[in-house]
Image: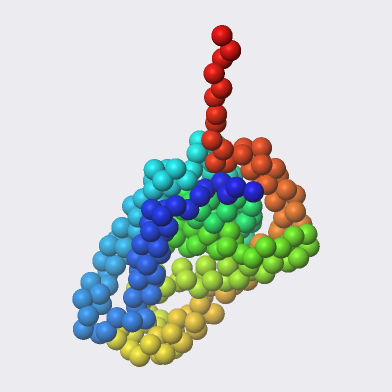
Amino acid sequence: MTPAVRIGRRSLLAILATSIVGGIAFTWPLFAAQDSTAVAHANDAPWLFALVVPLLLAVVLAQFTDGGMDAKAVALLGVLAAVVSAMRPLGGGAAGLEPIWVILVLGGRALGPGFGFSLGAVSLFASALMTGGVGPWLPFQMLGAAWVGLGAGLLPRASGKRELLLLSAYGALAAFAYGLLLNLWFWPFSAGLPSAIAFEAGAPLSQNLLAWIHFTIVTSLGYDIPRAVLTVVLIMLAGSTILTALRRASRRANFGAVPTFEGAAL
Protein backbone atom coordinates (compact mmCIF):
# COMPACT_ATOMS: atom_id res chain seq x y z
CA MET A 1 0.00 0.00 0.00
CA THR A 2 1.38 3.43 -0.97
CA PRO A 3 2.08 5.60 2.10
CA ALA A 4 0.00 8.75 2.40
CA VAL A 5 3.16 10.86 2.48
CA ARG A 6 6.28 9.81 0.63
CA ILE A 7 9.50 10.84 2.34
CA GLY A 8 11.57 12.32 -0.44
CA ARG A 9 15.13 13.56 -0.20
CA ARG A 10 14.20 17.09 0.89
CA SER A 11 11.63 15.82 3.36
CA LEU A 12 14.17 13.41 4.87
CA LEU A 13 16.75 16.19 5.23
CA ALA A 14 14.17 18.48 6.84
CA ILE A 15 13.13 15.76 9.31
CA LEU A 16 16.77 15.03 10.19
CA ALA A 17 17.58 18.74 10.63
CA THR A 18 14.53 19.27 12.81
CA SER A 19 15.29 16.19 14.89
CA ILE A 20 18.93 17.25 15.44
CA VAL A 21 17.91 20.75 16.53
CA GLY A 22 15.15 19.27 18.67
CA GLY A 23 17.54 16.78 20.25
CA ILE A 24 19.88 19.64 21.20
CA ALA A 25 16.93 21.66 22.50
CA PHE A 26 15.90 18.81 24.78
CA THR A 27 19.25 17.53 26.03
CA TRP A 28 21.52 20.59 26.32
CA PRO A 29 21.13 20.72 30.15
CA LEU A 30 22.78 17.30 30.39
CA PHE A 31 25.87 18.29 28.43
CA ALA A 32 26.39 22.03 28.89
CA ALA A 33 29.45 23.05 30.92
CA GLN A 34 28.95 25.45 33.81
CA ASP A 35 30.71 28.33 32.06
CA SER A 36 29.12 27.68 28.68
CA THR A 37 27.05 30.20 26.76
CA ALA A 38 24.05 27.87 26.94
CA VAL A 39 24.04 28.00 30.75
CA ALA A 40 24.59 31.78 30.75
CA HIS A 41 21.50 32.18 28.57
CA ALA A 42 19.52 29.36 30.15
CA ASN A 43 16.45 31.50 30.73
CA ASP A 44 16.32 32.35 27.05
CA ALA A 45 16.62 28.75 25.92
CA PRO A 46 12.89 27.91 25.68
CA TRP A 47 12.31 30.94 23.48
CA LEU A 48 15.39 30.40 21.38
CA PHE A 49 14.43 26.82 20.75
CA ALA A 50 11.01 27.99 19.62
CA LEU A 51 12.85 28.13 16.30
CA VAL A 52 11.98 24.45 16.13
CA VAL A 53 8.45 25.43 15.11
CA PRO A 54 9.45 26.96 11.76
CA LEU A 55 11.62 23.91 11.13
CA LEU A 56 8.67 21.63 11.76
CA LEU A 57 6.55 23.67 9.41
CA ALA A 58 9.39 23.47 6.90
CA VAL A 59 9.10 19.70 7.03
CA VAL A 60 5.44 19.87 6.06
CA LEU A 61 6.23 22.43 3.37
CA ALA A 62 9.04 20.27 2.03
CA GLN A 63 6.66 17.34 1.75
CA PHE A 64 4.35 19.51 -0.29
CA THR A 65 7.06 20.76 -2.62
CA ASP A 66 8.70 17.36 -2.82
CA GLY A 67 5.58 15.90 -4.35
CA GLY A 68 5.23 13.64 -1.33
CA MET A 69 1.79 14.81 -0.22
CA ASP A 70 -1.13 15.15 -2.57
CA ALA A 71 -4.46 16.86 -1.98
CA LYS A 72 -6.05 13.66 -0.63
CA ALA A 73 -3.29 13.23 1.94
CA VAL A 74 -3.70 16.87 2.98
CA ALA A 75 -7.42 16.33 3.42
CA LEU A 76 -6.88 13.19 5.52
CA LEU A 77 -4.23 14.97 7.58
CA GLY A 78 -6.70 17.78 8.24
CA VAL A 79 -9.43 15.36 9.31
CA LEU A 80 -7.21 13.43 11.73
CA ALA A 81 -5.67 16.64 13.10
CA ALA A 82 -9.20 17.90 13.73
CA VAL A 83 -10.05 14.64 15.53
CA VAL A 84 -6.99 15.00 17.75
CA SER A 85 -7.82 18.65 18.42
CA ALA A 86 -11.37 17.73 19.40
CA MET A 87 -10.25 14.84 21.62
CA ARG A 88 -7.53 16.71 23.48
CA PRO A 89 -9.84 18.78 25.69
CA LEU A 90 -11.69 15.57 26.67
CA GLY A 91 -8.72 14.41 28.66
CA GLY A 92 -7.52 17.87 29.54
CA GLY A 93 -4.25 16.29 30.61
CA ALA A 94 -5.93 15.31 33.89
CA ALA A 95 -4.03 12.42 35.47
CA GLY A 96 -2.37 11.82 32.11
CA LEU A 97 -5.60 10.56 30.51
CA GLU A 98 -4.92 11.69 26.95
CA PRO A 99 -6.69 9.59 24.28
CA ILE A 100 -5.02 11.51 21.44
CA TRP A 101 -2.01 9.19 21.51
CA VAL A 102 -4.10 6.38 20.06
CA ILE A 103 -4.78 8.44 16.92
CA LEU A 104 -1.12 9.42 16.58
CA VAL A 105 0.12 5.84 16.96
CA LEU A 106 -2.50 4.24 14.70
CA GLY A 107 -2.33 7.06 12.14
CA GLY A 108 1.44 6.71 11.83
CA ARG A 109 1.16 2.93 11.63
CA ALA A 110 -1.55 2.81 8.97
CA LEU A 111 -0.46 5.76 6.82
CA GLY A 112 3.31 5.71 7.09
CA PRO A 113 6.11 7.46 9.02
CA GLY A 114 5.96 10.70 7.00
CA PHE A 115 2.26 11.06 7.66
CA GLY A 116 2.77 10.18 11.32
CA PHE A 117 5.43 12.86 11.72
CA SER A 118 3.23 15.49 10.05
CA LEU A 119 0.17 14.40 12.03
CA GLY A 120 1.99 14.69 15.36
CA ALA A 121 3.31 18.18 14.63
CA VAL A 122 0.20 19.61 12.98
CA SER A 123 -2.35 18.15 15.40
CA LEU A 124 -0.53 19.35 18.53
CA PHE A 125 -0.18 22.81 16.96
CA ALA A 126 -3.86 22.93 16.00
CA SER A 127 -5.06 21.69 19.38
CA ALA A 128 -2.87 24.26 21.17
CA LEU A 129 -4.52 27.02 19.15
CA MET A 130 -7.97 25.68 20.06
CA THR A 131 -7.26 25.29 23.77
CA GLY A 132 -5.09 28.39 24.22
CA GLY A 133 -2.11 26.22 25.03
CA VAL A 134 0.44 28.22 23.05
CA GLY A 135 3.68 28.85 24.90
CA PRO A 136 7.37 27.96 24.96
CA TRP A 137 6.40 24.35 25.66
CA LEU A 138 4.55 24.00 22.33
CA PRO A 139 7.59 23.32 20.08
CA PHE A 140 8.69 20.55 22.43
CA GLN A 141 5.20 19.02 22.49
CA MET A 142 4.97 19.20 18.68
CA LEU A 143 8.34 17.56 18.19
CA GLY A 144 7.66 14.86 20.79
CA ALA A 145 4.31 13.99 19.17
CA ALA A 146 5.91 14.05 15.70
CA TRP A 147 8.52 11.53 16.84
CA VAL A 148 5.77 9.30 18.27
CA GLY A 149 3.93 9.29 14.92
CA LEU A 150 7.16 8.76 12.98
CA GLY A 151 8.18 5.82 15.18
CA ALA A 152 4.79 4.15 14.77
CA GLY A 153 5.23 4.22 11.01
CA LEU A 154 8.69 2.64 11.27
CA LEU A 155 7.61 -0.36 13.32
CA PRO A 156 8.22 -3.78 11.72
CA ARG A 157 5.50 -5.58 9.81
CA ALA A 158 2.92 -7.57 11.73
CA SER A 159 -0.75 -8.41 11.43
CA GLY A 160 -3.74 -9.43 13.49
CA LYS A 161 -3.36 -9.74 17.24
CA ARG A 162 0.42 -9.62 16.98
CA GLU A 163 0.18 -6.16 15.42
CA LEU A 164 -2.11 -4.93 18.20
CA LEU A 165 0.31 -6.23 20.83
CA LEU A 166 3.19 -4.55 19.00
CA LEU A 167 1.33 -1.24 18.83
CA SER A 168 0.24 -1.51 22.46
CA ALA A 169 3.82 -2.06 23.58
CA TYR A 170 5.00 0.84 21.43
CA GLY A 171 2.16 3.06 22.69
CA ALA A 172 3.08 2.35 26.31
CA LEU A 173 6.78 2.97 25.66
CA ALA A 174 6.02 6.17 23.74
CA ALA A 175 3.78 7.43 26.55
CA PHE A 176 6.59 7.04 29.10
CA ALA A 177 9.24 8.40 26.73
CA TYR A 178 7.12 11.45 25.92
CA GLY A 179 6.69 12.31 29.59
CA LEU A 180 10.36 11.73 30.34
CA LEU A 181 11.48 13.85 27.40
CA LEU A 182 9.04 16.72 27.95
CA ASN A 183 10.30 17.11 31.52
CA LEU A 184 13.66 18.18 30.13
CA TRP A 185 12.45 21.48 28.68
CA PHE A 186 11.44 22.98 32.06
CA TRP A 187 13.35 20.89 34.61
CA PRO A 188 16.50 23.11 34.54
CA PHE A 189 14.33 26.15 35.37
CA SER A 190 12.37 24.59 38.25
CA ALA A 191 13.35 26.44 41.41
CA GLY A 192 13.27 25.21 45.00
CA LEU A 193 13.83 21.55 44.22
CA PRO A 194 15.64 19.21 46.64
CA SER A 195 19.22 18.56 45.57
CA ALA A 196 18.44 14.92 44.67
CA ILE A 197 16.13 15.99 41.83
CA ALA A 198 17.49 19.46 41.01
CA PHE A 199 19.43 20.41 37.90
CA GLU A 200 22.98 21.57 38.57
CA ALA A 201 24.66 23.46 35.76
CA GLY A 202 28.00 21.93 34.80
CA ALA A 203 27.59 18.86 37.00
CA PRO A 204 28.77 15.48 35.63
CA LEU A 205 26.41 13.85 33.13
CA SER A 206 25.71 10.91 35.46
CA GLN A 207 24.64 13.26 38.30
CA ASN A 208 22.21 15.30 36.19
CA LEU A 209 20.96 12.16 34.45
CA LEU A 210 20.04 10.55 37.77
CA ALA A 211 18.48 13.80 39.02
CA TRP A 212 16.36 14.03 35.85
CA ILE A 213 15.13 10.45 36.24
CA HIS A 214 14.36 10.98 39.93
CA PHE A 215 12.57 14.24 39.03
CA THR A 216 10.43 12.30 36.53
CA ILE A 217 9.59 9.59 39.05
CA VAL A 218 8.56 12.12 41.68
CA THR A 219 6.65 14.58 39.48
CA SER A 220 5.34 13.00 36.29
CA LEU A 221 5.15 9.25 36.68
CA GLY A 222 1.62 9.70 38.01
CA TYR A 223 0.71 11.15 34.61
CA ASP A 224 2.83 8.86 32.47
CA ILE A 225 1.43 5.59 33.84
CA PRO A 226 -2.27 6.49 33.24
CA ARG A 227 -1.34 7.79 29.77
CA ALA A 228 0.35 4.49 28.95
CA VAL A 229 -2.48 2.37 30.41
CA LEU A 230 -5.19 4.30 28.56
CA THR A 231 -3.25 4.08 25.29
CA VAL A 232 -2.83 0.32 25.62
CA VAL A 233 -6.49 -0.24 26.54
CA LEU A 234 -7.81 1.86 23.66
CA ILE A 235 -5.47 0.22 21.13
CA MET A 236 -6.52 -3.26 22.24
CA LEU A 237 -10.23 -2.32 22.19
CA ALA A 238 -10.46 -0.14 19.09
CA GLY A 239 -7.11 -0.50 17.32
CA SER A 240 -8.24 -3.14 14.83
CA THR A 241 -11.31 -1.14 13.78
CA ILE A 242 -9.42 2.14 13.44
CA LEU A 243 -6.56 0.52 11.49
CA THR A 244 -9.03 -1.12 9.11
CA ALA A 245 -10.83 2.18 8.53
CA LEU A 246 -7.59 4.11 7.93
CA ARG A 247 -6.22 1.47 5.56
CA ARG A 248 -9.49 1.32 3.64
CA ALA A 249 -9.41 5.11 3.31
CA SER A 250 -5.81 4.90 2.13
CA ARG A 251 -6.63 2.26 -0.50
CA ARG A 252 -9.57 4.21 -1.84
CA ALA A 253 -7.59 7.44 -1.89
CA ASN A 254 -4.88 5.65 -3.91
CA PHE A 255 -2.18 8.06 -2.77
CA GLY A 256 0.47 8.86 -5.31
CA ALA A 257 -1.54 7.73 -8.31
CA VAL A 258 -0.73 9.66 -11.47
CA PRO A 259 -3.83 10.45 -13.54
CA THR A 260 -3.69 9.64 -17.22
CA PHE A 261 -5.86 11.18 -19.89
CA GLU A 262 -6.81 9.54 -23.11
CA GLY A 263 -7.56 11.57 -26.17
CA ALA A 264 -11.21 11.73 -27.16
CA ALA A 265 -12.15 9.80 -30.25
CA LEU A 266 -12.91 12.12 -33.16
Tell whether 168 sits left or right of 145: right
Question: Residue 55, percent across and down?
Answer: 35, 55
Write the residue at 69% across / 67% down.
166
Quadrant of the rendered structure where residue 177 is? bottom right
| Residue 27 appears in the figure | yes
Question: Residue 117, percent across and down?
Answer: 50, 55
Quadrant of the rendered structure where residue 203 is? bottom left
Residue furthest out toward the top: 266
Quarter of the image with the C terminus is top right
Q: Nearer the viewer, residue 235 or 13?
A: 13
Question: Residue 6, percent across and down?
Answer: 51, 50
Numbered marks: total = 0
Write the residue at 49% across / 43% down.
69
Tell whether 118 sits left or right of 155: left
| Residue 95 appears in the figure | no
Q: Nearer the viewer, residue 23 or 71?
A: 71
Write the residue at 38% across / 56% down.
14
Question: Residue 143, percent across and down?
Answer: 44, 60
Write the residue at 34% across / 75% down.
28
Residue furthest out toward the front: 266
How has the structure been colored for display?
rainbow
31 to 233, vertically: above or below: below
